[in-house]
Image (spheres, helix red, strand yellow):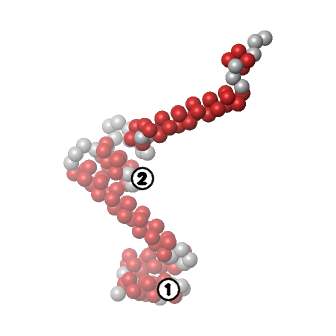
Amino acid sequence: MVDVFKMMKLKPLEIGILVLVVLVAYIISLYMLGEDKFVEQPKVFIPEGASDDFVIEQAYQHADETVCEHIDEGESKDECLERVEDKKFLDEGVEKAKKEFSGVSAEDQILLGKALVGKDSSLCEQIIDEATKQKCFDLLV
């Protein structure tokens, strides 16, 4: 039986280096294509003929303004973009609140939320954590 390596007069190490060079060249060519050449798959599937209300709800749930592109120009598209902006703003606020009140009990967080929404300082008095209680009073003044 004929040995291919002897026939080509290449040593296994040389073949390994050759494979490595080809692999590196391939990776570099992918890098040179740039990110704009890759097509990003949509995050949300919108069936053809979906109602504007459905599209708006999906865009809001996923906080993705690209979903609004499924709506023709007009009031519905503007509403969709506004709702996505609102959702992103709310999500950002929730994250900030989680960081600020990370050591506070869930009960105190609920009381704080209810106090702020209802503008009821009597709920602030029920908060156990003193710093949170003070923050509650400060926000209601």
Residue 62 badge: 2
Q: Is residue 3 left or right of residue 22?
A: right
Mark 1 element type: helix
| Residue 75 picture location, percent across and down | 22, 51
Kindly check if marks 1 and 2 are in contact, taking CB atoms under 8 A apart as contact. no
Q: Which quadrant would residue 51 be assigned to in this image?
A: top left
Question: At x 46% / y 67%, what residue is drawn?
Answer: 95
Q: Residues within 10 Å of mark 2 (few under 14, many from 20)?
A: some
Sooner in the amino-acid sequence: mark 1 or mark 2: 2
Q: CA distance from mark 1 to mark 2?
A: 34 Å
Furthest-top residue in this view:
1
Question: At x 52% / y 79%, what residue is drawn?
Answer: 108
Judging by the rendered image, the residue that carries numbered circle 1 is 131
Q: Quadrant of the C terminus?
A: bottom left
Q: Which quadrant would residue 6 be assigned to in this image?
A: top right
Q: Is residue 110 visible?
A: no
| Residue 90 picture location, percent across and down | 39, 65
| Residue 58 picture location, percent across and down | 39, 49
Amino acid type assigned to the residue bearing label 2 in the image: His
Task: Tell me if residue 88 comes above or below residue 49 in the rendering.
Answer: below
Q: Quadrant of the N terminus?
A: top right
Mark 2 element type: helix
Q: Is residue 128 left or right of residue 5?
A: left
Q: Residues within 10 Å of mark 1 (few under 14, many from 20)?
A: few
